[in-house]
Amino acid sequence: MKITFCGAARTVTGSCYLLEYEDKKFLVDCGLFQGNKAIKEHNYGEFPFNPAEIDFVILTHAHIDHSGLLPKLCKHGFNNPIYTTPATIALCEILLPDSGYIQEMEVERKNKKLTRAGKKLLEPIYTAADAMTMQHLFSPVEYNQSFSPVEGMEITLRDAGHILGSAMAAVNYRENNEKYKILFTGDLGRNDQVLIEDPFIVDRCDFLVIESTYGNRLHTGGFEVEKPHFAKIINDTIASGGNVIIPAFAVDRTQDVLMMIYEMQKENLIKEYPVYVDSPLAIKATEIFASSLECFDEESKQLCDVEGKAPFILDNLTFTPTSEESMRLNQIKGAIIISASGMADAGRIKHHLKNNLWRKESSVVFFGYQAEGALGRRLIDKEKKVTIHGADIEVKANIYNMDGFSAHADYEEMLEWLSHCKQLPNQMFVTHGDEESALAFADKVKEKYNVPIIVPYLGDVVELKMDGVKVVDKKDFATLVIDDNLLADINITLQKITANQDIDKLIRIRDFLKNIS
């Protein structure tokens, strides 16, 4: 068995692993690269394999950094099964077309500038239509039900406890009359999340590919800790005649916030104030969550009413799918408005911020990670004036950041999860974390468990053997589209590395440039 690390290697996004078993090739995940310009350029190049030669795909969950290049894969020749859980399929049916639409809009905006400059126009990575066309390839697999996509291999999906439908992929296979097991954690969740089950405890595996998003960080706060604080914010804001504006990611975070509101109402911490979900994508995602009770933990199932209605479908909740309904919210006071996007950089949330940021009686509450440069980050960093839709807005509203609501396990939680394995793996691969985070987590695992660990680079190829791992090839993929802006970014990065005298990084950059020259 060979593994090629085609994404999420010393970076968080673009999860994609190519596995070669005898004469078969398959992928675990096929995600979109997200982040700065240099990272996103990987989305535009050719795949480091022929999509038409891929026999099947295992998809761990619906997040775009794991699923977001599936339409491109199909567009370029893949036409075989994509195995994943039913809940993941339902979420992909709304998330992937939405991602395609975003690609189209982004390219349309860029092409306006290119047209004026007389330059060659761009094509979207894929369109919403491309994302719709490939939906028939999804093949549902329930948790804990093994299936055999090829002779000599058996695959089982286990609950990863990350988001609705998220899974670990356990791949059992035979080679030279020996049995092997490789486990891909996907994104590993946390214990005691609001709605879903805790991550499945795996008794043993020979090889483990584990994420490291929070490999050097610990979570603070959390659901129970933040609940009294959140209740006070709501009560004080509405008592003063303001609105509580909540930028929230459509999948998982919106439903978590609704669940928190349900519990606060049940415990009489707040009254049944009007609650609006104003995001077409979040509305669809909430409906999918509400119809996927089989994915809930026992505690959440018990909170469903006799007709099976999910607890977060509040009696005082209103969905506003149309633009007209959304615009009418501009006239209301004393309400809780949940809208996307979670970083406040796009979507209807910008209209609500434009309408409320200048009002000292209103509050804005963030529940998710805010990237450097995002509008949400700038508000948390206490910028006094922001520009939204061309208008300068003075920030007078109260800004709050609820920490500790990540769906990813932190390093202590991941080490705790590993401690329950009856037999630790012979070899681990740490992925899906920025370089600093991945290396830090690898050191922590070595220190505690003394397991051999590799933190792969993008493009590394390894051959799995019981007596060790053979590194077959070790080089970066030369798929970058080099333009003047990217060269400027590279130049700035080189200046920083040189200033810090990071010789190892300079050597790797030299080797990379040799490969693309």
Image (tube, rainbow, N blue to C red):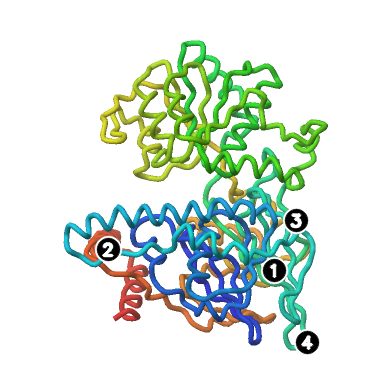
Q: Is tag 2's residue or tag 3's residue first in the polypeptide sequence?
A: 3
Place residue 210 in its image quadrant: bottom right
Q: Are marks 1 and 3 in contact (CB under 8 Å)?
A: no
**What's the residue at 42%, 52% (across, down)?**
102
Q: Is residue 106 above or below residue 136?
A: above
What x and y, as percent, mark residue 168? 68, 60
* Residue at the extreme left: 117
Place residue 195 in its image quadrant: top right
Q: Residues within 10 Å of mark 2 (few under 14, many from 20)?
A: some
| Label 1 to label 2: alpha-carbon separation | 40 Å
What x and y, as percent, mark residue 4? 54, 76
Q: Is residue 140 above or below residue 306?
A: below
Residue wearing tag 1: 425
Q: Are marks 4 and 3 in contact (CB under 8 Å)?
A: no
Question: Could you say which is closer to the camera, residue 136 or residue 48?
Answer: 136
Q: Is residue 210 left or right of residue 424?
A: left
Q: Is residue 480 above or below residue 157?
A: below
Residue wearing tag 4: 177
Q: Is residue 273 left or right of residue 148?
A: left
Q: Quadrant of the C terminus?
A: bottom left
The amino acid pointed to by label 4 is Asn
| Label 1 to label 3: alpha-carbon separation | 14 Å
Dot 2 lies on which element?
A: helix
Q: Is residue 123 visible?
A: yes
Dot 1 lies on which element?
A: loop
Q: Is tag 1's residue or tag 3's residue first in the polypeptide sequence?
A: 3
Residue wearing tag 3: 201
